[in-house]
Amino acid sequence: MVNVSKEKKIINIINNNDIRSKETSMLLEAQLKKYGYTISDEFNYNAELSICIGGDGAFLRAVHKHGFPYIPFIGVNTGHLGFFHEITPEKINTFVENYTKGKYKLEDIYLVEAIVCTRTSCMELVGVNEIVIKGIESKVIHLNVSIADNHLECFSGDGLIVSTPSGSTAYNLSAGGSIVYPALKTLQLTPLCPINSKAYRSLQNSAIIPDGMTIKVNPEYRDENTVLIVVDGKQFKYDNVVEVIFKLSDMTLRRLTLDSQDFWSKVRDRFI
Ligand code: NAD
């Protein structure tokens, strides 16, 4: 056994049901145990690290399931794109060695929060990539948008994406939004198929909103019952939605990085 401190260090390993993820999980567990780590059977909130094996979808589901824990996480990519993932299964031994030696950095991942108010109550939702407000059943939706309490537009179209910097390379990018460096504390408001005609005028491009400013969206009266809220790909339907207020969440996630690849190289390798 490798010489390490006697302190009992706990690590969470979360993997999806993919065969490659299960195999990687077993190899990783064996390697971590050699260095004296304990692998928790269930998600342990006292763990010093969470390792998520799978793709981006598996990572997003795990974060939501465990309530956005502030435990640092690192991803092992066995999925397709793996934008949240730092290492490949082939590199797990090097990772464990570097981790044990403290050769890593921690960076914050900013989250987006939406307070959804109906005529009777308000709910809070939190997203890692984005929160989308759109019409049900592909209906055009009409939304009054204010930023920092200044009325900006009455948007008409498919909907609006409010994305985090980390989520800027996901749905936001496909919708024509910009890539935002993850350390910038901003939100991005990106229109989904905005209508521009003699009847409706909507901004065609996305806007970057700094921390501390809220984005307030009030559906027009006729649309109060046709609003769909989609958080990181998961849909929520509420009746009589009168207001949705978006802001950067006070919570953050913590990503462990080994500096193996900088952000812009990752963008090049994944998208170009
Ligand atoms: P999923 O897991 O199949 O993910 C869809 C794609 O988005 C995958 O290729 C995934 O690798 C990629 N992705 C996820 N987060 C990313 C990020 N931060 N940067 C770059 N790529 C990222 O689908 P799901 O679990 O239903 O939804 C998860 C995410 O899918 C949503 O948060 C949303 O951003 C994205 N999405 C994208 C589109 C689109 O591009 N047209 C449409 C719907 C949802």
Image (cartoon, grey):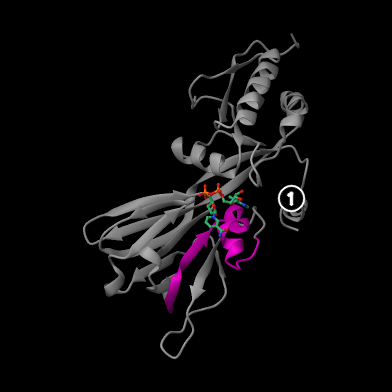
Is 193 magenta? The answer is no
Q: Measured from the top left, where is residue 109 in percent x and y? A: 59, 47
* Residue 151 in sight here: no
Q: Residue furthest bottom?
A: 198
Q: Is residue 14 left or right of residue 23?
A: left
* Residue 225 in sight here: yes
Q: Measured from the top left, where is residue 50 in percent x and y? A: 58, 30
User: Quick one: quadrant of the C terminus?
Assistant: bottom right
Residue at horizontal 55 percent and vertical 44 percent from the top = 57
Residue at horizontal 60 percent and vertical 66 percent from the top = 177
Q: Count the marks: how many?
A: 1
| Residue located beneath label 1 in the image | 266
Q: Is residue 99 left or right of residue 58?
A: right
Q: Measured from the top left, where is residue 232 in percent x and y? A: 49, 51
Q: Amino acid at mark 1?
A: Lys
Residue at horizontal 66 percent and vertical 41 percent from the top = 85
Q: Measured from the top left, where is residue 186 in percent x and y? A: 57, 60
Quadrant in which residue 91 is drawn: top right
Q: Secondary structure at mark 1?
A: helix
Label 1 CB less than 8 angstroms from ligand 1: no
Identify which residue, 80 or 260, lies in the foreground: 80
Task: Mark 1: give few (<14), some (14-19) or many (20+) Cα within 10 Å.
Answer: some
Residue at horizontal 65 percent and vertical 10 percent from the top = 6
Task: Tell me if residue 270 comes above or below residue 197 in the rendering.
Answer: above
Task: Tell me if residue 252 comes above or below residue 4 in the rendering.
Answer: below
Quadrant in which residue 53 is drawn: top right
Is 159 magenta? The answer is yes
Q: Residue furthest left?
A: 120
Task: Tell me if residue 198 comes above or below residue 166 in the rendering.
Answer: below
User: Quick one: quadrant of the N terminus?
Assistant: top right
Please report the bounds of the magenta region as a residue range.
151-179
